[in-house]
Image (cartoon, coloured by chain):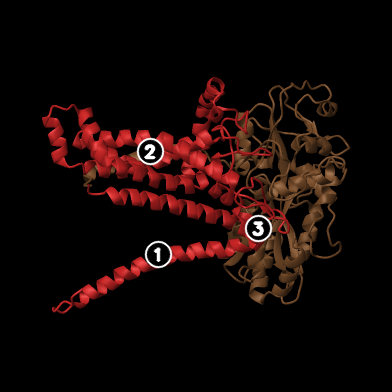
Chain colours: A red, B brown
Amino acid sequence: MTRNRTKVRPGDRIFKNLSTGAGVVVVALIGLIGLFLLVQAIPALRADNVNFLTSRTWDTSDPNNLRFGILDLLLVTVSTSLVALVIAMPVSLGIALFLTQYAPRQLARPFAYVIDLLAAVPSIIFGLWGILVLAPELAPIAQWLNETLGFIPIFGQGNVFPNFSGTIFTAGVVLAVMLLPIITSLSREVFERTPTPHVEGALALGATRWEVIRTTVLPFGKAGYIGASMLGLGRALGETIALAVILFIPRGKLFDFSIFDGGATFASQIAANYSEFNNPTSAGAYIAAGLVLFVLTFAVNFAARAIIGDKKGD
Amino acid sequence: MKIMRPMGAVGIVASAALVLAACGSDPASTSSGAPTSGAAAAATGTANVACGGKTPLSGEGSTAQKTAVDIFAQQYAKACSGQVVNYNATGSGAGVKQFNAKQVDFGGSDSPLSGNDATAAAARCEGNPAWDLPLVIGPIAIGYKLDGVSSLTLNGEVSAKIFNGSITTWNDPAIAALNPGVTLPSKPIQVLSRSDESGTTDNFQHYLAAASKGAWTQGTGKAFKGGVGNGASGSNGVASAIRAADGAIGYMESSYVKDGITAAKLDSGSGAVELTAQNVGKALDAAVFKTPGSNDLAMDLDKIYAANTPGAYPLLLATYELVCSKGYDADTAKAVKAFLTVSATTAQQPIADKGFVPLPQSLQDKVLTAINAIS
């Protein structure tokens, strides 16, 4: 790189250093958090009497006989997030397309505002609403699904039967509502950026509204939409208090691959037992679970950014 | 995205409507269902309080006694104007740790100090022992919902069998034997427990272990070990779950027994006893302490659970305030004594309205003696 002959103004240098500093601090912070989790988790992992990654029991009451494994937590976390995504993705796509393609400008702006406000509702409110208001309404639907489609494993009898309120299904619906604003706002931004020549060209060739969307908006916005959904997935994986309040814990039964099961996710397990971290070894077990969640969410967000980043500005 | 100001106002109104609609009614309601504020021996009169000393006083610990300690602080401020107490409900474990680290003036714990914690506390108190003073007593109810059965009697053994899955239907002969004349349906029993770690679970399991004559072998601790039924989040979650299911049973603080949930009567060998403040007071009259004769009033609750005191309701939890017997500086000692005196006397009636049991006379006398001995 040839050195500039002109003097670098101090303002430029200061700003460059500040920005670099900010970037470095953030990366260092993530690294330090990861390091903290690792350091606190290692003694507990060493003392674990069962395989951490494949065991399905979780018993940390006796610090001298720790038996904890994250498989069940992982399965429940992934299930709730998948149910949430399956519900939220089509709805968000619909909302984003409606706001960018069909709605008149005057309607689109306040609509978008209200959707974004949904993201401002605290998750404890969602949890309480979910278990007190939504669950009693969903229980008959869940029961009907279980009765008519029970031969399919994911609709089979849950491990919290005969209760249909504190299930992965209810938690998934509430999570879907929480994911809507994230996926919708990001998808809306991407769909708005569809190159006007493409849209106009399609219209000129006589395409209907839907054909325009199908041929220009969706292919262009596909990567952005997928990336937005994966960011939503990252949020769903880490949702703590709403799931701690909604999900019932089945005693003596493990996750059965049905959406009518209950259980604990990584975050809700830590939240439920957080106030009684009495000794560092038991606490280390929960921190180890937190570490797995950290790595999982990091990987999902990384993949999401990679997908969005690759295809932006096509 | 440009938002026009009038549209912004619409958005604010819309969100306010959403938030207000989402707010459910306050679950921990202010009126307690089961225990009537009995006249039993709870002399709550105003003792002479020597106001003054350190303010604000800081405490930390058990979440179970948070409501009570807030009322204590209110009454203390009324009795001694200008005196403030800050209590942080971060859990018994954190409370003990902070007390031992001299970060707070008193701790709140669901169980008395023992082992390493007691040694560390003695070190914190300049070589003097730390005392556990029981100031908040709460009954634990076995709440159930069963259509057609408005009164149910259980005992330690049958409760243990229900909560560990040995008894699975309501019309089991063991339950019928305790309830002559009551038609029990043949519905399956749905057991509800706490999914989060809690002192209520710990005390309930201690009761089952002590009073079930060997039927409960699952152990004790803050996590429910019965291995049957479902766990819901918080006593509120357990209560809602019981309300929603006919044939459900669970354990909870007595203030949650209302709106369709009935508390079971307990028979410790001398007949069915209802859950009232008076009857819990009777159980406390027979209290046995871990170090009898000392001012450290850590109670041996297992003896209360296993006792067969006629007319006493044994299933209760006691939370303690951890204080130094000596070792405070003069200001702190004065404030701690004043605060605890108000808490043990005038403040006991207001907390009875929240579902706690006021200290019976016998226990109150002992607590006041210990408080006066703090220096």
- How many angstroms separate mark 2 from mark 1 (CA)? 40 Å
Quadrant of res B183? top right
Q: How many marks do you count on the picture? A: 3
Which numbered disc covers residue A27?
1
In this rendering, which labeled residue sits more in front, label 2 or label 1?
A: 1
Classify B177 as above or below A264.
Answer: above
Mark earlier in primary sequence (1, 3): 1
- Apparent side of residue B268 relative to residue A155 in the rendered image (left or right): right
For label 2, the residue is B17
Q: Amino acid at mark 1?
A: Val
The answer to whether residue A251 is visible is yes
- How many angstroms separate mark 2 from mark 3 (CA)? 43 Å
The answer to whether residue B285 is visible is no
Q: Return the residue nearer the eye: A68 or A176.
A: A68
Q: Name the spot of residue A156 as percent of width and height, x first.
A: 57, 27
Q: Return the residue nearer the eye: B4 or A75.
A: A75
- Apparent side of residue B336 relative to residue B23 in the rendered image (left or right): right
**Badge 3: few (under 14), some or many (20 or more) residues near its Cα, within 10 Å?**
many
In this rendering, which labeled residue sits more in front, label 1 or label 3?
A: 1
The chain containing the residue under callout 1 comes to: A
In this rendering, which labeled residue sits more in front, label 2 or label 3?
A: 3
Q: Are marks 1 and 3 on the same chain?
A: yes
Q: Are marks 2 and 3 on the same chain?
A: no
Picture residue at 23% right of the left edge, 45% below the top: B3
Which numbered disc covers residue A282?
3
The chain containing the residue under callout 2 comes to: B
- Apparent side of residue B202 relative to residue B63 in the rendered image (left or right): right
Q: Name the spot of residue A64 as percent of width and height, x first.
A: 73, 59
Q: Amino acid at mark 2?
A: Ala
Picture residue at 79% right of the left edge, 53% below the top: B361
- Apparent side of residue B169 relative to residue B32 in the rendered image (left or right): right
Identify the element where label 3 is drawn. Answer: helix
